[in-house]
């Protein structure tokens, strides 16, 4: 992995073995102290949702269709409430909404999605402004990662600062070792989770570490797609912006916005008020730079009026602006979702190469 | 954790129709909680999000000056959903204000320098704030010559006409008011577009002289070559930009130009900075 500069607390790592029967019992016990979330198959694909007591996360998957970002940052989220009833003293005044920030655990998040939260945190948790909804929800969560023995075909995580067994942003890492699970405890939060689950922590850590290392190497070898990002930082923004390839990159795009909705590192939102009768809420909803209205001024002027401008914005944001703004690498963890689900096969790996190799 | 999305409740104290087409109104707001007013500490050039429960929020430049205490003033052009709704509101109505937001004109850097203010149309709002700020007796000695070039289509489209008339009478500020055209025989100021009047009236550029420009894109486009000709260096040309906004605090991701968020890293940029940013505004 590249030196991305996130502070990883030094923690005496411990690995335990859990047989699959005890796994279920532990999760049942965890329900008393955590709200549990995990991948569940609905129709054809998996997505995250809250588990009811006794329900197990379905770990028989490659990855969820949508990323895990909704676990912290829902697609639609209430921000404030208000009344328009002029007989009430507080009419037209926005008020905070009570939210449940009690401990929750997300089980089965893939390493790419977990690391994505760290990239996105740069945006929501800044020195000047703190987004309370995002931060409180993130901090209330224990992240139980699920290592990828069989990475997705479109994955390029190993060259995007991530990898199938990557641990950044996780409190625990679960590894499927066939007949049993290995669970690596990475943080104090992870330790607390373990205690609440009551799994006995007897294990030969050395043998287990070796076993994980072997599985990890095998998984990494399966990822053959690679990108190069080394030269992005030194490119001149205005030159990349004016590069001749954008029309061609954007040619087939239908501005459907799928790429931004499935992406774990896309964070843009819109703020809207909704009223029913005399009561109302202010809410935020995921938005997408792929839509023309995203930047439309009231005067009719639109700085990103053409689809080429919007496609360019998406890639420049992820692969240049973010790189320059935070100095922490690209705003992409290589999960490959945008590649898998783009109806016209636009491939960020190819665009990244075009950008990285561009000479003005 | 303080919630940066939560507006302070305010009451509309006064509404003034500014222009003959009635499309521009100035609203004076007072805070419902005196504590909030203390917290709302701003500099000339900043903006705020005006919030109407049930309609939404809009970014508007602060037209009052930090030297005017006890209230805030904004001048709003009627264009769409929220601005039209606010235009129909009455004195006494309750709404919200969130801010102050964004950066401001570089007052520290401009200390001891000449300041030339160039404005067109209704973008004169934060320039009014700036003029009131500089003319405050405590602040006026901090600046050398002050010039103001301000243009509108017709005399009736000029904002803050009473104040313009007062400033005309002073000898510590050089006013160059202009209109595109008029059939008023009593019009005693300039006639001509802002770039032309800038060419005729602005002092020559040098390290000691700063120009602050705010106006429609077309005015900025034609004024810039004039300033180049007059010898203004790009570090000393200051502009305030507009982008569609929602959060106003650099989080919702909508108002970027390159890596800069206009709401948080701007809206004020020097021309030197803009030269290194994508032309996407
Ligand atoms: C820093 C800054 C300062 C501004 N100062 C003033 C001012 O002093 N006076 C004034 O009349 N106008 C000003 N504007 C423009 C003003 O914000 C828009 O005219 C206003 O948001 C239009 O809102 P609407 O709901 O009426 O229009 P609609 O077209 O219905 O817009 C819907 C929403 O889109 C967003 N939006 C639309 N146009 C703009 C825009 N140009 N800029 C930002 N967001 C937009 C708003 O969130 C708005 O609620 C300023 C804009 C910025 C960015
Ligand atoms: S998924 Fe593909 S077609 Fe849809 S907006 Fe993204 S790049 Fe364009
Ligand atoms: S840009 Fe594509 S590959 Fe990268 S994190 Fe987002 S969805 Fe995954
Ligand atoms: S308005 Fe949200 S980032 Fe600028």
Image (tube, coloured by chain):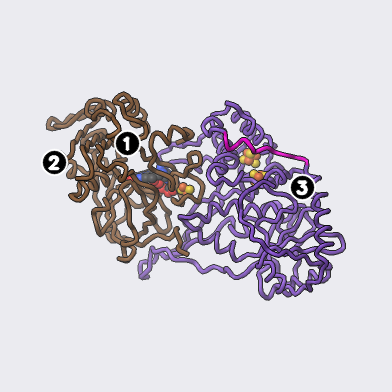
Q: Which residue is mark 3?
A: A152
Q: Image height check: is A26 above or below A7?
A: below
Q: Which residue is mark 1?
A: B213
Q: Earlier in the sequence, mark 1 or mark 2?
A: 2
Does mark 1 have its CB less than 8 Å from ligand 1?
Answer: no
Residue at (34% x, 29% y) in the render: B224
Q: Nearer the viewer, residue A41 or B47?
A: B47
Q: State yes or no: residue A232 in magenta.
A: yes
Q: Which residue ends up furthest to the right in the rendered image?
A: A179
Residue B232 forms part of the magenta stretch: no
Q: Is residue B80 visible?
A: no
Query: Which chain is painted in purple?
Result: A
Above or below A352: residue A13: below
Question: Percent from the top left, x then y, of residue B238?
Answer: 35, 37
**Dot 2 falls on which chain?**
B
Instruction: State the extent of the magenta-drawn residues as a range.
Output: A224-234
Residue A126 x %, y % = 50, 54
Q: Chain of mark 1?
A: B
Could you tell me what secondary structure mostly forms the magenta stretch? loop
| Dot 2 crowding, Cα within 10 Å, few <14, some 14–19, many 20+ | few
Classify residue A89 by image quadrant: bottom left
């Amino acid at each position: 992995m590249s030196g991305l500069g996130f502070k990883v607390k030094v923690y005496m790592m411990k690995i335990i073995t859990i047989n699959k029967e005890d796994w279920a019992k532990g999760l049942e016990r965890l329900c008393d102290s955590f709200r549990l979330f995990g991948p569940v198959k609905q129709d054809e694909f998996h997505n995250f949702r809250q588990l009811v007591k006794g329900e197990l996360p379905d770990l028989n998957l490659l990855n969820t269709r949508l990323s895990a970002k909704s676990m912290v940052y829902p697609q639609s989220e209430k921000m404030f409430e208000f009344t328009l009833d002029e007989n009430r003293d507080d009419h037209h005044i926005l008020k905070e909404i009570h939210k449940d920030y009690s401990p929750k655990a997300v089980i089965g998040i893939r390493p790419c999605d977990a690391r994505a939260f760290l990239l996105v945190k740069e945006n929501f948790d800044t020195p000047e402004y703190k987004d309370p909804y995002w931060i409180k929800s993130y901090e209330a969560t224990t992240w139980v990662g699920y290592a990828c023995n069989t990475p997705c075909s479109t994955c390029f995580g190993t060259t995007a600062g991530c990898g199938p067994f990557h641990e950044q942003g996780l409190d625990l890492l679960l590894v499927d070792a066939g007949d049993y699970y290995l669970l690596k405890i990475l943080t104090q939060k992870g330790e607390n989770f373990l205690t609440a689950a009551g799994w006995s922590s007897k294990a030969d850590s050395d043998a287990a570490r070796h076993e994980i290392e072997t599985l990890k190497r095998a998984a990494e070898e399966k990822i053959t797609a690679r990108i190069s990002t080394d030269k992005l930082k030194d490119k001149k923004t205005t030159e990349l912006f004016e590069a001749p390839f954008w029309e061609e990159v954007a040619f087939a795009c239908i501005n459907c916005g799928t790429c931004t909705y499935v992406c774990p590192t896309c964070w843009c939102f819109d703020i809207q008020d909704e009223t029913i009768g005399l009561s109302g809420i202010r809410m935020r909803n995921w938005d997408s730079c792929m839509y023309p209205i995203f930047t439309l001024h009231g005067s009719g002027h639109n700085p990103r009026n053409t689809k080429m401008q919007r496609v360019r914005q998406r890639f420049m944001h992820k692969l240049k602006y973010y790189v320059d703004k935070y100095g922490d690498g690209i705003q992409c963890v290589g999960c490959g979702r945008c590649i898998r689900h783009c109806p016209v096969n636009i491939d960020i790996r190819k665009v990244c190469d075009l950008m990285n190799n561009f000479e003005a | 954790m303080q919630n940066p999305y939560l507006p302070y409740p305010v009451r509309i104290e006064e509404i003034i129709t500014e222009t003959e087409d009635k499309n521009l109104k100035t609203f004076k707001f007072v805070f419902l909680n005196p504590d909030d007013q203390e917290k709302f500490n701003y500099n000339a050039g900043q903006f705020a999000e005006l919030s109407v429960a049930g309609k939404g929020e809009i970014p508007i430049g602060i037209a009052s000056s930090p030297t005017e205490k006890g209230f805030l003033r904004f001048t709003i052009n009627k264009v769409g959903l929220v601005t039209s709704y606010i235009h129909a509101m009455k004195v006494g109505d309750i709404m919200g204000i969130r801010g102050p937001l964004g950066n401001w004109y570089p007052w520290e850097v401009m200390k001891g320098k000449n300041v030339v203010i160039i404005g067109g149309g209704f973008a004169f709002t934060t320039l009014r704030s700036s003029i009131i700020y500089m003319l405050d007796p405590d602040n006026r000695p901090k600046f050398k010559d002050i010039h103001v070039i301000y243009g509108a289509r017709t005399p009736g489209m000029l904002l803050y006409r009473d104040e313009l008339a007062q400033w005309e009478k002073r000898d510590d500020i050089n006013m160059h008011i202009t209109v595109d055209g008029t059939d008023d025989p009593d019009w005693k100021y300039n006639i001509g577009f802002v770039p032309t009047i800038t060419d005729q009236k602005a002092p020559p550029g040098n390290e000691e002289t700063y120009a602050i420009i705010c106006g429609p894109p077309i005015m900025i486009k034609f004024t810039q070559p004039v300033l180049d000709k007059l010898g203004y260096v790009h570090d000393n040309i200051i502009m305030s930009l507009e982008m569609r906004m929602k959060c106003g605090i650099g989080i919702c991701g909508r108002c970027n130009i390159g890596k800069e968020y206009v709401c948080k890293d701007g809206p004020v940029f020097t021309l030197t900075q803009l030269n290194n940013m994508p032309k996407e505004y």
